[in-house]
Amino acid sequence: MKNLRLFSTALIFIISTSVYGQAQNGGNKQTGAKPTLKKLEWLIGKWKRTNVKPGQTATESWVKESASRFKGQGVVIKGNDTTFVEKLSLLVKDDQIFYVADVKENKGLVYFKLSSITSTGFVCENAEHDFPKKIVYQVSGKDLKATISGNGKSIDYSFVKL
């Protein structure tokens, strides 16, 4: 009876550890499976921003380069002039998922570590970055809301899939 109790306790511990590891990073710590971007494939395609200033158009586009890397680009155009370009990526690095932003205002790439993922959204954070510190994407059908926040400030970007 004592051995059965010990076995049951060990089995519960192994199962709960496996489930916790999968929920945290999309991978399976027990089997060594690497996290993938599969849950984020809804992001692939071209999105038109709907809450832009008058006279501007803005888009964000994402392509799947591999199971472990998506490449994105954000562009704002005013008239015939491109006023803003942001190179983006979602990638698996060191068994973690990162949202990476490359904008001319920053000296280099800025990495935001994935802190939460569901089938309809994700959250990435970098507490060391000046702004934003947190990036949230949430999809509902053909609508996408991206929010950047930090230091008591928050900016929402609304998109529709083209």
Image (tube, helix red, strand yellow):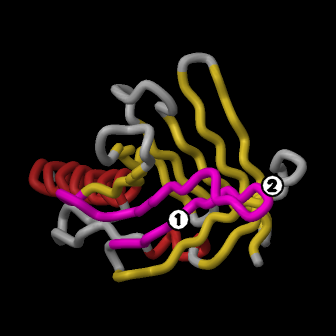
Above/below status of 39 relative to 108: below
* Residue range (magenta): 69-95
Above/below status of 146 relative to 142: above
Q: Amino acid at mark 1?
A: Gln
Closer to the observer: label 2 or label 1? 2
Per the image, label 2 sits on a secondary structure element best described as strand
Quarter of the image where one finds residue 64 = bottom left
Image coordinates of residue 99 in percent, x first then y, are 41, 54
Q: Which mark is residue 73?
A: 1
The chief SS type of the magenta part is: strand
Q: Amino acid at mark 2?
A: Gln
Image coordinates of residue 110 in percent, x first then y, are 35, 43
Q: Is residue 70 magenta?
A: yes
Q: Residue tagged by mark 2?
A: 56
Q: Residues within 10 Å of mark 2 (few under 14, many from 20)?
A: some
Q: Residues within 10 Å of mark 1 (few under 14, many from 20)?
A: some
Closer-to-camera residue (81/123): 81
Q: Measuring 42% from the left and 45% from the top, which residue is drawn there? A: 104
Q: Of the residues under marks 2 and 1, which one precedes in the sequence?
A: 2
Image coordinates of residue 43 in percent, x first then y, are 59, 70
